[in-house]
Amino acid sequence: MSLLTGNIQTAAWMKLRRFGIDGYFTPGAFGDDHHDRNALGPVAMAREAERSGRLYAPEAVVVIGDTPRDIACARACGARVLAVATGTYSREELAAHGPTWLFDDLADAGAVLAALGGTAG
């Protein structure tokens, strides 16, 4: 899993380390890679291709986020998007932006994995 965030790289890793989850992600794209979040998807996909030696079709990529900007970022690079209403935006507000999947939270891991079922490859 690659990390794509509008945060600058140093801040992103600090936030993840605080919760002990920094080891689950490889570097994808960060706010210091480009000022426009919608330009970060291709950066993340290129880094993952370089790291893994494998090219991913945009439709095989899933961006997980909790804001309309996250949904727009995913759409800008052709990725699918799993929106989760755990931030400041309600389920209804996120739904208005047309995510591929929408969950209130990620508590039901089985339901999330079932929704994503066809994305691994």
Image (cartoon, rainbow, N blue to C red):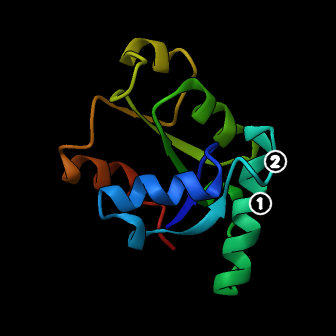
Q: Amino acid under label 1?
A: Val
Q: Is residue 97 above or below residue 69?
A: above
Label 1: state its secondary structure: helix
Label 2: state its secondary structure: loop
Indicate which label's residue lies in the foreground, 1 or 2.
Answer: 2
Q: Is residue 89 above or below residue 40?
A: above
Residue 44, given in percent of the width and then of the height, sits at: 69, 61
| Residue where numbered disc 1 is placed | 43
Residue 38, given in percent of the width and then of the height, sits at: 76, 39
Q: Amino acid under label 2?
A: His
Q: Is residue 56 above or below residue 108?
A: below
**Total number of numbered discs in the rendering:** 2
Of residue 40 and residue 49, the one placed in the foreground of this image is 40
Residue 23's disc is none
| Residue where numbered disc 2 is placed | 34
Contact, CB < 8 Å: mark 1 with mark 2?
A: yes
Residue 48, given in percent of the width and then of the height, sits at: 66, 73
Picture quadrant where residue 53 is located? bottom right
Residue 16, given in percent of the width and then of the height, sits at: 41, 57
Q: Residues within 10 Å of mark 1 (few under 14, many from 20)?
A: some
Q: Residue at x 33, y 56 (%)?
A: 18
